[in-house]
Each structure stands twice: as structure tokens, then as C-alpha cells.
Image: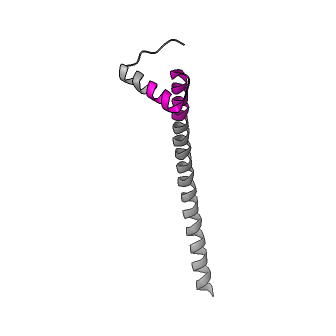
Amino acid sequence: MGAVAISRTDEEVLELLQERLGLPSKAQVIHRALGELQGIVNRARLAQEIEASVRKCRKADEKEHRLLTGAAFHRGEED
């Protein structure tokens, strides 16, 4: 891969992060940042999948609850 042109401000941020993180190169700062971004994306995707699963389960639970509540109500009338 070739070099990427960045602004002087971004270059300064890279240098500051390199120093603060104790990394030997700016390339490693970028590599670490990409890893963090990938983690954020993965967690967001997982959260979406969990939310979708919860919605599906909630619908099934509500249906089951209605059926059980109706059965208990009818059973009580027969006693």
C-alpha cells in the first residue's frame, strides 16, 4: 500500500498519539485506531442483532402470554 496524504493537523495528532501511547511508529497508531473502530462496528452490529432477536422473542412471548392468560381465565370459569 502507498502513503496517504493527511493534513498537518492530523499529522500532529498522530504524533501526539504515538507519543502518548508509546508506539514506535505512526503506522502502529493508525493500526491501533483501525482495530478500535472495527471493535465499535462489531459491537454496534451485535447490538442490532440482539435488538432484533428481542423484538422477535417479545412478540412470541406476548402471544404465549395471551394464550395462557385466556386458558387460565376460562379454566377459572369452569370451576
Q: Which residues are magenta?
A: 15-38
- Measuring 58% from the left and 84% from the top, which residue is drawn there? 77
Across and down, in percent, residue 61 comes to 58, 62
Left or right of 42? Residue 4 is left
> In front here: 41 or 34?
34
Q: Is 50 drawn above or below residue 26 in the view shown?
A: below
Quadrant containing the N terminus is top right
- Measuring 58% from the left and 69% from the top, which residue is drawn there? 67
Across and down, in percent, residue 5 comes to 42, 15
> In front here: 74 or 16?
16
Q: Is 73 drawn above or below residue 66 in the view shown?
A: below
In which quarter of the view is residue 79 placed? bottom right
Across and down, in percent, residue 20 comes to 49, 32
In which quarter of the view is residue 70 placed? bottom right
- Measuring 57% from the left and 50% from the top, which residue is drawn there? 53
Find the residue positioned furthest to the top: 2
Magenta span includes 29: yes
Tally of numbered tags: 0
Magenta span includes 25: yes
Q: Main secondary structure of the magenta part?
A: helix
- Measuring 58% from the left and 59% from the top, which residue is drawn there? 60
Asked which colour scheme the image uses, the reply is one colour
> In front here: 35 or 20?
20
> In front here: 4 or 59?
4
Find the residue positioned furthest to the bottom: 79
Q: Is 78 drawn above or below residue 17 in the view shown?
A: below
